[in-house]
């Protein structure tokens, strides 16, 4: 993978991770993600077209290992958008049936493409010259009808199937998590303190997660014995916010190119300024 494409993929992953964190509504989140991915795939295509030498080995690597990393995300978020927009209104029984039907669709696709699944999952390569080079389609290799409508200068007969395999793994996890949430759904205990005004967190989720990890690291709760998960759930309750996958967000914060503790630095700067203005302390 060239440095340009590596950076393109890294930037795409970073944008999608923060989109997942910042947008709670799955439909709006999917719409935003799809726009980001489409733009990234256009850049990927430009990079591919500018490549002067396109050997068979280069094409196979690109269409088997690189392009699917981008298009799988397009398939995934498009599937989530459809799942959420078609989700029926009703009780938990109806919703569970709907989600299980969506899982069944994934299984049917797996069953219908079992030979290629085996080929790809076992790391086979003896048919790569047919599957992952342009203009080498073979109708006997279980082609999908859409293949005849795509841009053949940027597609092979099976790169989309690789992307679907990758996407289906993520879709399955998404659906199973939804079902697990239904199974474990329990009403949260209401705070014993009767606050007159509910304090909602209106800053970014990433900022609160940064603060969460800082406070946990300092051990300021229960003499440092509190678990990170317990503190996160407490924050979610008192600030009326869903922190989502805060572990993954922390990893993203760690790999920031600069200013890893952006929110904490801003807090310090603003507090120092306030201290310098004694009127604000009254």
Image (cartoon, rainbow, N blue to C red):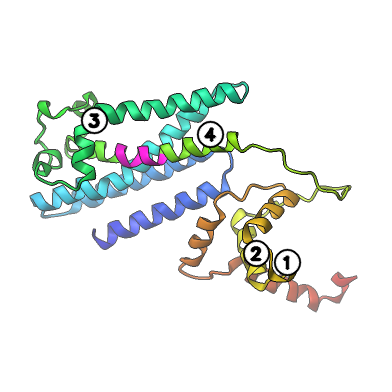
Mark pair 2, 1: CA separation: 13 Å
Rendered view: 147 above or below 5: above
Badge 3 marks a residue whose secondary structure is loop
Bounds of the magenta segment? 164-170
The residue labelled by disc 4 is 179
Mark pair 4, 3: CA separation: 26 Å
Where is the N terminus found, in terms of image quarters?
A: bottom left
Could you tell me residue 2's position as x and y percent?
24, 60
Give me the residue at 53% from left, 69% from top: 260
Is there a contact, CB below 8 Å, between mark 4 and mark 3? no
The residue labelled by disc 2 is 211
The residue labelled by disc 3 is 113
Horizontal side of residue 129 vs 101, given as left or right = left
Q: Is residue 164 visible?
A: yes
The residue labelled by disc 1 is 221
Give me the residue at 28% from left, 59% from top: 4
Could you tell me residue 276's position as x and y percent?
79, 78
Badge 4 marks a residue whose secondary structure is helix
Disc with the residue nearer the chain's start (3 vs 1): 3
Give me the residue at 61% from left, 38% from top: 184
Mark pair 3, 1: CA separation: 53 Å
Main SS of residues in magenta: helix
Mark pair 4, 2: CA separation: 31 Å
State which mark lies toward you, 2 or 1: 1
Could you tell me residue 132's position as x and y percent?
15, 42
């Amino acid at each position: 993978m060239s440095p340009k494409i590596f950076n393109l993929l890294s930037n795409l992953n970073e944008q999608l991770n923060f989109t997942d964190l910042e947008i709670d509504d799955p439909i709006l989140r999917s719409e935003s993600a799809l726009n980001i991915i489409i733009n990234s795939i256009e850049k990927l295509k430009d990079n591919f077209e500018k490549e002067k030498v396109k050997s068979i080995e280069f094409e196979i690597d690109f269409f088997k290992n690189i392009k699917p990393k981008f298009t799988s995300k397009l398939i995934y978020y498009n599937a989530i958008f459809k799942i959420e927009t078609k989700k029926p209104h009703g009780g938990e029984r109806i919703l569970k049936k709907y989600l299980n039907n969506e899982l069944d669709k994934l299984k049917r696709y797996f069953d219908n493409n079992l030979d290629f699944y085996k080929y790809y999952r076992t790391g086979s390569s003896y048919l790569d010259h047919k599957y992952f080079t342009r203009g080498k389609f073979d109708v006997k290799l279980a082609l999908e009808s859409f293949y005849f409508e795509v841009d053949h200068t940027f597609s092979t007969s099976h790169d989309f199937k690789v992307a679907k395999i990758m996407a289906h793994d993520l879709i399955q996890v998404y659906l199973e998590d939804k079902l697990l949430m239904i199974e474990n759904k329990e009403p949260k205990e209401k705070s014993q303190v009767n606050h007159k005004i509910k304090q909602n967190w209106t800053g970014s989720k990433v900022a609160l997660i940064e603060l969460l990890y800082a406070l946990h690291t300092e051990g300021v709760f229960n003499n440092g014995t509190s678990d990170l998960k317990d503190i996160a759930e407490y924050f979610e309750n008192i600030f009326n916010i869903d922190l989502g996958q805060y572990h993954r967000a922390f990893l993203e914060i760690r790999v920031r190119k600069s200013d890893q503790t952006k929110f904490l630095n801003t807090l310090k700067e603003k507090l120092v300024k306030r201290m310098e203005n004694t009127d604000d302390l009254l």
